[in-house]
DNA sequence: TCTCAGTTGTGTGA
DNA sequence: TCACACAACTGAGA
């Protein structure tokens, strides 16, 4: 190739102009022409779970129609990531824009190299497992076509591969490891300003055939009310490479008030930084999960997900703000609870994923994920060893619990409010995520964390494979965290933050008029109080069709119905802790052959949860099955016990309390026959107290 | 081998 | 509001 470079800048995880090392590298080539493109990848359209809210946040220009009362905090406008970026590009060069090409990058890029006589392709590094595979293919095609490839890190503070290298080649599994590794790598680079001009794009005439993707399997069918037509023409319906429209995607209406785009992201960051004490003293654990308008945390995570806000920009602006605060003689918050700490946690999960690849998002094959015989386990493809997207209904009771959890009908108002907020807004506070994740897995339902992760994948605006998988493993106590005896109560925990229940009243409107005393335990309210609040606590949260998707029953006279709790929480907590204790003693990890071939069952003779399996309601238990998958060596971790511990809980103990009835709320963990190391506990107790008043964002 | 810390638990009693 | 006990995990570091 002679003459000036002709460059494709491939936008992916970096929908911004500010602080983009990759974009800078492209412009440093002093190109003759620059094609800013986005490949409309069928992997995300059909194979990854993406709900309407995240599609809107990515691309779609529609006016804000809902939650008008929140319009001051979430300003309306024709914004969102791709549209905003495209407009910003055009502002710098009226001939340019974001050119959205509707085909898989693996097939269309080689054609574009030829059609547009490209010399270089530049993009931001993406270490997600699918992205790595895809990019390797692109790099190979580029090589064959004589096109130079430039890849730059910009999605995380540190290059995840560098982080892993600095961690001895191992996945980063603790914040301490990240801090040590980061020290070896050096300081996070200062952000780069946005370019002031952009080169012209070259001729964009395209006379090439389109490779249309296969629509099947299409796991996003459920997100659409119309037909998906985005692949009808390579350059879009009017051949202008436009950002896809809602109708083109056939999507159901979005419901969130959170909106995307670099313009909004930078404005939000300015607003946060302008509040010096908030920024400098931000401490995640002391931010209220019940605050919703406005939320207590920054809600910048969706912007980081789409790359509309650089993490390095937040890092440095927060760091500088904390430094200025310190210079005034005041004490800023520290890692890991401060804003910088939140970004380090994000890097930790990216480091873990970079090292473990596809296996990081599942149990089977994951050398760092404990095996727990959860209910509703994923089915595994024997050929790839990867999850297929479907799961085994190991128990109809647990499937019912899962559906009730997903649709906010558990009968626990705190859990239901959070799940409804998640579906409506695409965002919930980090501690809210803790609460619902703990409840679904080790602190209530004993259901596979992969089920919960899939729901979050579908509904979260800020869904990041690495962070989502990592957080679910953390909360399920299968990796990163092991204190499974610390369990979130759906009653005590929210009471601490929001005793009046404003959050619940907003997202579970049928309980709006419930007395404060019963807002987190409505089943305890006398019928007279229920009638006065125009809401009866009865039934199992089914809709008229007998499912969980449709509207809840409303009885004559505007009397609403809110479901009874689906189990006795204290009882379930006890069962789950015993189950986890047993699974820890068995000590299997996801890469163990016995996990892959199903012979783990011999180590759990009493079933998933032990002899008390099934809980209070005593529904029919199905048989676990259908897993298996490719054996890839490995085994039990050295030093881990494989002895089975007596699960020791009397079945009658659990049958004793009626579902939804009055419970004593006593500490199930207390055993008066045991004398404990008092001196040691004294110290630990003090520290625990200190943590609670410490304070902290890892949405 | 031991000690102690670990972003974000709960309930009780002073 | 605070300290402590509860039951007991892993990983880092001495």
Image (cartoon, coloured by chain):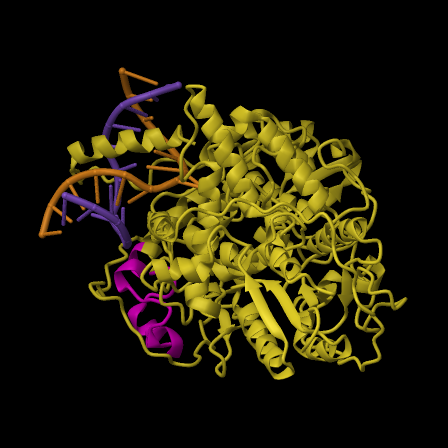
Chain colours: A yellow, B orange, C purple
In the rendered image, residue A665, in percent from the top left (x then y), is placed at 40, 35
Relative horizontal placement of residue A289, taking residue C2 as reference (left or right)? right
Relative horizontal placement of residue A290, taking residue A492 as reference (left or right)? right
Relative horizontal placement of residue A550, taking residue A235 as reference (left or right)? left
Residue at image point 37% right, 64% down: A371
* Magenta run includes residue A477: no
Count of numbered circles in the view: 0
In the rendered image, residue A423, in percent from the top left (x then y), is placed at 66, 49
Residue at image point 30% right, 41% down: A669
A529 or B13, nearer to the observer: B13
Specify the quadrant that holds the N terminus of chain A. Answer: bottom right
Residue that lies at the very extreme toward the front in this rendered image? A3
Q: Specify whether residue A47 is in view.
A: no
Q: Specify whether residue A51 is in view.
A: yes
Residue that lies at the very extreme toward the right in this rendered image? A238
* Magenta run includes residue A592: yes
A508 or A276, nearer to the observer: A276
Q: Quadrant of residue A317?
A: top right
Q: Relative to C11, say whether A100 is above or below.
A: below
Q: Quadrant of residue A290?
A: top right
Q: Relative to A679, say whether A201 is above or below.
A: below
A57 or A657, nearer to the observer: A57
In the rendered image, residue A223, in percent from the top left (x then y), is placed at 73, 61
Q: Relative to A449, say whether A187 is above or below.
A: above
In the rendered image, residue C5, in percent from the top left (x then y), is placed at 23, 32
What segment is highlighted magenta in the picture? A581-610
């Amino acid at each position: 190739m002679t003459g000036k470079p002709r460059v494709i800048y491939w936008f992916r995880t970096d929908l911004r102009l500010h602080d983009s090392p990759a974009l800078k590298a492209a412009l440093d080539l002093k190109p003759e022409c620059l094609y800013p493109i986005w490949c409309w990848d069928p992997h995300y359209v059909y194979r990854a779970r993406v709900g309407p809210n995240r599609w809107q946040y990515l691309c779609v220009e529609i006016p804000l129609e809902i939650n008008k009362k929140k319009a001051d905090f979430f300003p309306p406008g024709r914004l969102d990531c791709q549209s905003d970026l495209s407009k910003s590009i055009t502002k710098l060069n009226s001939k340019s824009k974001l050119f959205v090409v509707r085909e898989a990058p693996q097939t269309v890029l080689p054609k574009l190299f030829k059609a547009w006589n490209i010399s270089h392709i530049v993009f931001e590094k993406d270490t997600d497992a699918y992205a790595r595979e895809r990019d390797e293919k692109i790099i190979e095609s580029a090589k064959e076509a004589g096109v130079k490839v430039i890849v730059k890190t910009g999605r995380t503070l540190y290059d995840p591969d560098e982080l892993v290298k600095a961690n001895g080649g191992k996945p980063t599994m603790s914040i301490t490891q990240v801090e040590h590794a980061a020290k070896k790598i050096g300081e996070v680079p200062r952000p780069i300003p946005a370019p002031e001009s952009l080169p012209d794009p070259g001729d964009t005439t395209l006379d090439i055939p389109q490779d249309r993707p296969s629509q099947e399997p299409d796991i996003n069918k459920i997100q659409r009310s119309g037909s998906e037509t985005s692949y009808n023409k390579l350059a879009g319906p009017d051949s202008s490479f436009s950002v896809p429209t809602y109708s083109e995607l056939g999507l159901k209406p979005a419901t969130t008030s959170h909106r995307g785009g670099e313009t909004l992201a930078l404005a939000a960051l300015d607003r946060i930084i302008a509040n010096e004490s908030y920024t400098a003293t931000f401490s995640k654990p002391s931010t209220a999960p019940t605050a919703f308008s406005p939320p207590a945390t920054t809600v910048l995570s969706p912007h980081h997900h789409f790359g509309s806000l650089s993490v390095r920009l937040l890092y440095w602006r927060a760091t500088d703000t904390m430094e200025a605060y310190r210079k005034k003689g005041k004490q800023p918050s520290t890692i890991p609870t401060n804003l910088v700490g939140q970004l380090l946690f994000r890097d930790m999960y990216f480091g873990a994923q970079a090292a473990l690849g596809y296996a990081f998002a599942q149990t089977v094959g994951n050398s760092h994920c404990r095996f727990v015989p959860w209910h509703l386990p994923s089915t595994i493809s024997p050929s790839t060893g990867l999850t297929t997207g479907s799961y085994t209904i190991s128990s109809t009771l647990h499937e019912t619990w899962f559906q009730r959890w997903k649709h906010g009908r558990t009968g626990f108002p705190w859990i239901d409010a959070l799940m409804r907020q998640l579906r409506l807004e695409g965002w919930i506070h980090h501690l809210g995520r803790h609460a619902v994740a703990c409840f679904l897995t080790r602190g209530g339902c004993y259901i596979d964390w992969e089920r919960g992760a899939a729901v979050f994948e579908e509904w979260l605006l800020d869904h990041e494979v690495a962070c989502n998988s990592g957080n679910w493993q953390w909360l399920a106590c299968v990796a990163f965290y092991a204190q499974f005896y610390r369990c979130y109560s759906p009653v005590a925990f929210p009471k601490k933050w929001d005793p009046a229940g404003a959050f619940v009243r907003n997202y579970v409107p049928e309980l709006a008029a419930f007395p404060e005393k019963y807002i987190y335990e409505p089943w305890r309210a006398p019928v007279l109080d229920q009638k006065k609040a125009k809401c009866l606590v009865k039934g199992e949260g089914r809709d008229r069709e007998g499912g969980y998707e449709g509207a809840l029953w409303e009885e004559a006279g505007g009397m609403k119905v809110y479901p009874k709790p689906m189990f006795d929480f204290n009882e379930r907590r006890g069962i789950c802790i015993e189950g986890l204790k047993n699974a820890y003693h068995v000590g299997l990890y996801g890469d163990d052959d016995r996990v892959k071939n199903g012979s783990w069952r011999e180590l759990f003779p009493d079933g998933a949860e032990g002899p008390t399996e099934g809980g209070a309601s005593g529904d029919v238990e199905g048989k676990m099955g259908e897993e298996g998958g490719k054996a890839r060596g490995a085994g039990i971790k050295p030093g881990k016990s494989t002895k089975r511990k007596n699960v020791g809980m009397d079945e009658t103990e659990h049958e004793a309390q009626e579902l939804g009835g009055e419970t004593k709320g006593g500490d199930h963990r207390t055993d008066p026959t045991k004398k404990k190391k008092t001196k040691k506990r004294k110290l630990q107790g003090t520290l625990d107290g200190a943590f609670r008043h410490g304070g902290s964002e890892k949405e």
